[in-house]
Image (cartoon, rainbow, N blue to C red):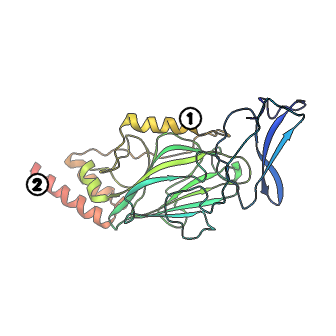
Amino acid sequence: VLAKCQCNLIGFVFVYLLQIYFKVDGRDEVVETLCGDTLPKPILSNGPWLMLEFRSTYNNTENKGFTADFSFVTNYGVTTGYQPNKTDCTFHYFKNASSQGWIQSPNFPGAYPRNIRCNYFFYGDPLDYVLIRFTYFDIEGILPCDENSASDTVEFSNFLTRDRKFGLYCGARRDLIVRSDGRFFRVTLATNDRLDGTGFRALYAFESTIAASMAQGPGSGVGGVGLVGVVGAAGVPYLSHHQYHQIATTERSAATVSKMGKSGAGSRRKEICSNAACWFWLVFVAVPTLNRSQLAMVTTTAMATWLLII
């Protein structure tokens, strides 16, 4: 416990504080200053070097200082997934290992490291897609979430390369759900050397395109970004509306936000009506959004519906 004070108050005479230094471009830079009796979140360095410096202006018998545990890690504070190379912040998630689970940014709920790029790769079965449901999302930055705004970003892609379907995401977002077009999906967190955020935590699940289409009816589609209650999937690990928001509220309270940016841009898939005319529209107009297996299934169902009407 350090003396209660305003850590950044210039000219304050009696100061007890603990400063954390990282190496940034070869120089020692203060990334956090601690004082008072509030227990800080976990701290993860941006490399193999970190320094703690305790400062006191006079002898004191009332406050007892601090104690801390430390460890040298290679997993960047990410405890799920398979990490093939201990020097890279890259994690793989396979359906044959687990059909659902959690992902999080490095060091969550503490601040993520600066100057880092972390990839999360998802591999499902041939007829699967990947559903990712965020319970917490705070990435330092402002619109338009690019290099010009000096923002940290989260990128979604159906490929190893950039996907024009998805923009870059930053800021504080609530109730964000993302899903892939097919069996493979990538999530990438990229940070710079400016400011810090507390990152993200999300529930992922591999789902069958056939099961989802039959459960949701026409127009459900696959791929895109939405809000809770707008994008669903059959068999997703069930969270009631109350449970979901309880988890999200708890994680927002647990994570300390360094800087709140404006929420990033997103798109919302509109629901398509379910009568025979709309089935006809779906088959002949929305074909470009479907793969071969989905198209065959939708066409067969549409013909059956049309025959029943006749």
Up the image or down, 62 lies above or below 206; here it is above
Q: Looking at the picture, which amino acid does disc 2 mark?
A: Leu
Up the image or down, 79 lies above or below 239; here it is below
> Mark 2, residues whose alpha carbon is within 10 Å: few (<14), some, or many (≥20)?
few
Quick check: can you spot residue 217?
no
Percent x, y of residue 220: 32, 50
Query: Depth-wise, is mark 1 or mark 2 nearer the camera?
Result: 1
Precedes in sequence: disc 1 or disc 2 = 1
Would you name the residue on which mark 2 appears? Answer: 307
Q: Which residue is at the far bottom? A: 85
Task: Please say if the residues under marks 1 and 2 sit with CB atoms less than 8 Å apart.
Answer: no
Residue 270 appears in which quarter of the rendering? top left
Q: Is residue 101 left or right of residue 264?
A: left
Q: CA distance from mark 1 to mark 2?
A: 55 Å
Q: Nearer the viewer, residue 244 or 190?
A: 244
Q: Is residue 110 left or right of residue 31?
A: left
Q: Is residue 178 left or right of residue 167?
A: left
> Mark 1, residues whose alpha carbon is within 10 Å: few (<14), some, or many (≥20)?
few
Percent x, y of residue 85: 58, 70
Total tally of numbered discs in the picture: 2
Residue 94 appears in which quarter of the rendering? bottom left
| Residue drawn at the location 55% of the way across and 37% of the way down | 252
Q: Looking at the picture, which amino acid does disc 1 mark?
A: Ser
Percent x, y of residue 213: 27, 54
Q: Secondary structure at mark 2?
A: helix
Would you name the residue on which mark 1 appears? Answer: 253
Which quadrant of the rendered structure holds the N terminus? top right
